[in-house]
Image (spheres, grey):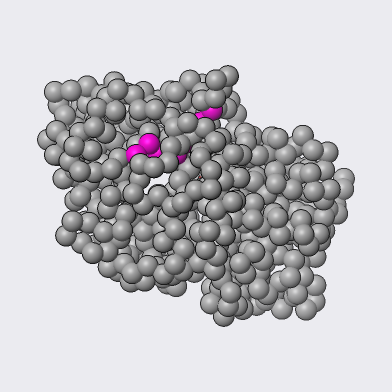
């Protein structure tokens, strides 16, 4: 068994999978390490009961909610492709303004060490890799693009098209949301109901496994080890370089050496890996001279909203085609950013039973048949007290106190008003709690100053010269857009840098 590589990438999700793909022809010998296995293609992929009620694709793991003194089941998925195996495949860019400091009602959202314009070419490249279908020119907050979307937008079904017209008639600017599904002429997508939140049984969703890991493995230089968990990174005596990663491979402990190590375990698990790797040179955790490893954890402020018209059935199959950004930077009576409102995949009774166990299923089904379903999402702000730490037994502990809540309440109110005006007398909302950490980010923020950031603008550790992190950890702010495309774009930027230095 080979135990020396040029690069070891830990984690095969949006960050790690994209990096392996970007470097597949670089000549570097790459080992991609993934704690999970391939997600099986099986009938349960599309069963709401299996996926939502029985949580078939979530690990048995529990994390500790430090503020409340209880445990919770986190929204993580340990498979080749990581969380993208179940993601909604929405691929928006951040807004240009998100890269600069932005005043919010709850405080200042910090600027990024790179600008939108620097990231723009990589956004475009990522959109090509992830087959993004979209249409420019509809959303007033849209940042400039150097080229059109690679594929035409996923069109609305008639019911959603009619809703879009009603929203426009009220002065809003609903737009076709950029989506990564394979609707090319010979594409595999069948436009089903079970996309957002479900694994794709026909591999037609643009997840990191399908679009990056499998193509990367066509290169003889890329090796994937599944069922292999990185437990510690080991350094030289001075702590300036990582010399090896300690792995648990199917129960066997192995060390692998490399010239460059990349952690792409997701924002919580990358922070946890660095904390677990504390040693004499790094007593508070690897790469933690700033004391910021694990801090500034963000997840967005999220609320699910069901708008019901009891007299009209919603016969839409693929619902996630529209978003509204009219309140992104301010609202009618609010001078601060509020966030993004996007359609969810069509809710079904089986997806609601876990959240509403006391409501009889026929009632849930009747509601779901007549509802339009939205994800209402506002920016949360980085706060050093919101953080990941390890318990004495090594388990993950999260301290999370939601913030910037006034802006979120305003956005939920605006969404409710919007849907009532569009003809939906009943609007139900369900705020999300600590377990909805799908958009986790910020725990190893990047920046210029080693005193106020963990990573430099190329996502290299300020403290450890051959350690990089490409996953959502690097975000200095969460913005209020879905994160995956930005993770992929910055990963491609880092890949270009790595090719120059290798
Ligand atoms: C239900 C759901 C819907 C979502 N919808 C969207 C959406 O529509 N659009 C969007 O932009 N984003 C969406 N997201 C978020 C998106 O999936 C994440 O932002 C993205 O996957 C994060 O990429 P990452 O590289 O940081 O982590 P991940 O993609 O989660 O990858 C981390 C990988 O590291 C592996 N790993 C962890 N620890 C170790 C270890 N110690 N050793 C080895 N391997 C390890 C994990 O198994 C995993 O494969 C959604 C997420 C969920 C859960």
Is residue 175 among the parts visible in the rendering? yes
| Image quadrant occupied by the N terminus | top right
Q: Please provide percent x and percent y for residue 89.
A: 48, 38
Q: Is residue 222 left or right of residue 277?
A: right
Q: Is residue 127 above or below residue 100?
A: above
Q: Please provide percent x and percent y for residue 426.
A: 14, 36
Q: Nearer the viewer, residue 403 or 128?
A: 128
Q: Please provide percent x and percent y for residue 199.
A: 51, 32
Q: Is residue 7 left or right of residue 484?
A: right
Q: Nearer the viewer, residue 468 or 119?
A: 119
| Image quadrant occupied by the C terminus | bottom right
Magenta segment's dominant SS is loop
Q: Quadrant of residue 21?
A: top right
Q: Quadrant of residue 256?
A: bottom right
Q: Is residue 54 left or right of residue 79?
A: left
Which residue range is magenta in the image? 175-182
Q: How many numbered marks does the figure carry? A: 0
Residue in the picture at 53% in, 77% down:
452
Is residue 246 among the parts visible in the rendering? no
Residue in the picture at 62% in, 36% down:
211
Q: Is residue 364 above or below residue 395?
A: above
Residue in the picture at 22% in, 38% down:
167
Magenta highlight on residue 105: no
Q: Is residue 274 left or right of residue 180?
A: right
Q: Is residue 370 above or below residue 261?
A: above
Residue in the picture at 44% in, 52% down:
143
Q: Please provide percent x and percent y for residue 485.
A: 52, 47
Q: Is residue 358 above or below residue 312?
A: below
Q: Quadrant of residue 177?
A: top left
């Amino acid at each position: 068994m080979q135990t020396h590589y040029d690069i070891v990438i830990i984690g095969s999700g949006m960050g790690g999978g994209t990096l392996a793909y970007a470097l597949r022809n670089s000549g570097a010998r790459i080992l991609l390490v993934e704690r999970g296995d391939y997600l099986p293609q099986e009938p349960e992929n599309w069963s709401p009961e299996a996926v939502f009620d029985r949580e078939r694709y979530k690990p048995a793991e529990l994390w500790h909610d430090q503020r409340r003194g209880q445990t919770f089941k986190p929204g993580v998925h340990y498979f080749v492709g990581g969380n993208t195996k179940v993601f909604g495949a929405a691929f928006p860019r951040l807004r240009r303004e998100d890269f600069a400091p932005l005043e919010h009602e709850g405080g200042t959202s910090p600027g990024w060490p790179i600008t939108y314009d620097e990231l723009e070419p990589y956004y475009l490249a990522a959109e090509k890799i992830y087959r993004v279908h979209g249409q420019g020119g509809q959303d007033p907050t849209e940042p400039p693009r150097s080229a059109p979307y690679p594929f035409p937008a996923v069109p609305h079904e008639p019911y959603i098209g009619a809703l879009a017209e009603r929203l426009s008639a009220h002065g809003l600017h609903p737009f076709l949301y950029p989506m990564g599904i394979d609707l090319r002429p010979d594409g595999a997508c069948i436009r089903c109901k079970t996309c957002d939140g479900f694994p794709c049984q026909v591999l037609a969703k643009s997840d990191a496994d399908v679009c990056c890991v499998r193509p990367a493995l066509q290169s003889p230089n890329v090796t994937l080890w599944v069922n292999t968990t990185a437990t510690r990174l080991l350094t030289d005596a001075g702590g300036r370089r990582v010399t090896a990663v300690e792995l648990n491979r199917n129960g066997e402990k192995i060390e692998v050496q490399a010239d460059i190590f990349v952690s792409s375990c997701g924002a919580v698990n990358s922070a946890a890996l660095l904390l677990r790797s504390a040693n004499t040179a790094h007593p508070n955790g690897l790469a933690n001279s700033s004391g910021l490893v694990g801090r500034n954890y963000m997840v967005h402020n999220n609320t699910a909203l069901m708008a019901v018209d009891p007299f009209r059935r919603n016969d839409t199959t693929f619902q996630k085609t529209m978003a509204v950004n009219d309140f992104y930077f301010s609202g009618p009576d609010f001078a601060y950013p509020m966030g993004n409102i996007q359609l969810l995949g069509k809710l079904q009774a089986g997806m609601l039973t876990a959240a509403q166990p006391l409501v009889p299923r026929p009632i849930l089904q009747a509601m779901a048949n007549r509802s339009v379903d939205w994800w209402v999402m506002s920016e949360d702000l980085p706060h050093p007290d919101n953080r990941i730490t390890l318990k004495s037994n090594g388990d993950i502990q999260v301290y999370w106190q939601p913030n910037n809540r006034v802006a979120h309440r305003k956005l939920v109110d605006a969404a409710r008003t919007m849907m009532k005006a569009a003809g939906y007398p009943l609007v139900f909302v369900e705020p999300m709690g600590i377990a909805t950490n799908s958009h986790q980010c910020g725990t190893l923020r990047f920046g210029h100053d080693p005193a106020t950031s963990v990573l430099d603008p190329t996502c290299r550790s300020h403290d450890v010269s051959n350690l990089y992190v490409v996953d959502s950890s690097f975000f200095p702010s969460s913005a209020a857009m879905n994160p995956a495309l930005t993770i992929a774009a910055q990963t491609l930027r880092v890949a270009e840098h790595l090719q120059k230095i290798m």
